[in-house]
Amino acid sequence: MEEPNIGGRRINPLGIENRIKSIEGVSDAAVFSVRRNGEEVLACAFESILSRDQIRVQIREVLPARDRPKKWIVYDRFPVTPRGKTDLTVIRREVV
């Protein structure tokens, strides 16, 4: 997995995903970078039964501020490709 440069430092999306997946009520997560207003920012999609506010509180407990996604979206179920894999193209488009 690519390590994007966010704010002058390399970020490990897989490590952040694993921390987020450890939150009770989050069944899956996808962490990636997106370009927003000419700047690279960290984004995350969650598959969860929790509300945005509940997830926000939990993220503060498991991630330091520098690793917290700036943009995110919560799904009951991730969109999937015809082959049944998580459709990151759709997720990226919806996050931006």
Image: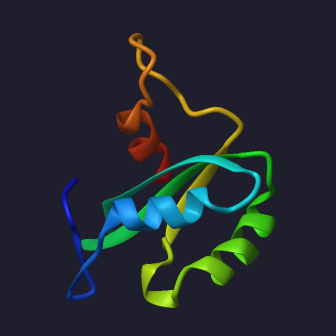
Q: How many marks?
A: 0
Left or right: where 61 falls relative to 43: right
Quadrant of the image occupied by residue 22: bottom right
- Residue in front for this viewpoint, 60 or 95: 60
State left or right for residue 83 relative to residue 24: left
In which quadrant of the rendered view does residue 28 lie? top right
Q: Quadrant of the C terminus?
A: bottom left
The residue under the point 32% across, 60% down is 34
Work out whether 57 lies above or below 89: below
Say which residue appears at 80% left-offset and 57% top-offset: 51
Between residues 22 and 76, which one lies in front from this camera angle? 22
Image spot of residue 21 (x, y percent): 58, 56
Where does residue 31 sit, x and y in percent of width and height?
Answer: 42, 57
Q: Who's the residue at 59% across and 53% down the image?
A: 73
Left/right placement of residue 43 relative to residue 47 reads: left
Is 8 above or below relative to 3?
below
| Residue 53 against residue 63 in the figure, above or below | above
Q: Position of residue 38 (x, y in %)?
A: 24, 72
Q: Is residue 91 left or right of residue 28?
A: left
Is 3 located above or below residue 60 in the figure? above
- Asked which quadrant contains residue 15, the reply is bottom left
Q: Residue furthest top?
A: 82
Provide residue 40's location: percent of width, then percent of height: 27, 71
